[in-house]
Amino acid sequence: MDLLPLHEFRKCVARYRGEHKVVRFSCLDQFFCLAFAQLTGRESLRDIEACLRAMQPKLYHMGFRGRIARNTLANANERRDWRIYADLAQALIGQARPLYAEEDFGAELEQTAYAFDSTTIDLCLDLFPWARFRRRQGAIKLHTLLDLRGSIPTFIHLTPARVHDVNVLDQLLPEPGAFYVFDRGCLDFARLYVFAQSAAFFVTRAKSNTQFLRRYSHPVAKSTGLRSDQTIVLTGVTSATDYPAPLRRIHYFDAEHGNDFVFLTNNAALPALTIARLYKARWRVELFFRWIKQHLRIKVFYGTSQNAVKTQIWTAISVYVLVAILKKRLRLDLSLYTILQILNLTLFEKTSISQMLTNIPPEVLDSESAIQLHLFSL
């Protein structure tokens, strides 16, 4: 918690009057409770209350100032503006991104690269009637723009699950010179042209019914999996109007899995193989979604209102970024999962966190894929 930018946090609280008429249980106490729940995997408000009260003598030294009560925490989640914790997460993201600026992500690229995608979080419609998705199903969608260097989320937008990803592209502010990697579901030429007009580059997959005219072809080394590298113009009834500039069409064959991929990009300078590898790195956003769903609490919620759900999700993102910052600040050669598991068991230990995370025998640092133990030994 020493990594928290307290000055920025207090500005966030003041911006949304988070402690208006609050006497004891501050917004910082609320964040500590929710961060504790994320780090230790608490199941409910009663679970959080019981565990923290068991550690009552140590709470003051951990930064808690108010008394921990289930009703008090429930009311805070219900009433205090979730944007306090959204702005805190953005402040932490601003600290984390420079730490990972030199991180390799599999593509030889000097510019910043982002991957955009979304994941759906299912909700019980009886408990969350505001999150109606289908007739008998509730859900919300987490739209995320991920910096591929370090897998740090830079933009997160929560919407009802009915909202399509392509509509959220309007919320993005294209960064000149940066690369944006989209899935085929975001293929909207009018919106992609906005990125091109903003001097940003995009990489996406073409649909099978995309109509185009080839202007000329570039030579490719077919031994690398490339099949063609063409400069095209769109000829569809609406696409030609929506995107009047030339595009680059790259055909790549993945011999390992036997799949064909056709990419569209507005960048004419990078090698075709780099474009293919850049799109392959888009898978990192899927890994990010899987990681936070498996290791943080964003599928079981401590409240049923929109404000409570958004507060919990943004707190989870803040904890994820805090662990990422901790990893770089202490120069740890550990995965985020390993760090999280160690913190889970040692939150109230008096040993310094640097000593705790660095004095680990190499033989216990199993890979993240070897989480499941053998049930029987033969």
Image (cartoon, rainbow, N blue to C red):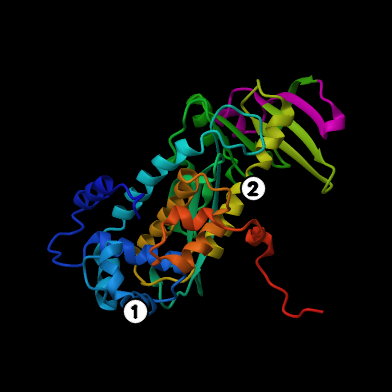
Quarter of the figure with residue 17: bottom left
The residue at the point 47 percent across, 75 percent down is 124
Residue shown at the point (58%, 33%) measured from the top left: 202
User: Can the viewer see residue 297 in this picture?
Assistant: no
- Where is 66 relative to 126, above or below? above
In the rendered structure, the answer to whether residue 13 lies left or right of residue 92 reads: left
Which stretch did the figure color magenta? 219-247
Say which of 370 and 273 sits in front: 370
Q: Do the numbered discs 1 and 2 sit on residues whose CB atoms are within 8 Å?
A: no
Q: Who comes first in sequence, dot 1 or dot 2? A: 1
In the rendered image, residue 357, in percent from the top left (x then y), is placed at 51, 56
State the residue at coordinates (30%, 63%): 62
Q: Residue furthest right?
A: 223
Query: Would you name the residue on which mark 2 appears?
Result: 283
Q: Quadrant of residue 216?
A: top right
Callout 2 amino acid: Trp
Residue highlighted by disc 1 = 54
Kind of residue sitting beneath label 1: Ala
The quarter in which the C terminus is drawn is bottom right
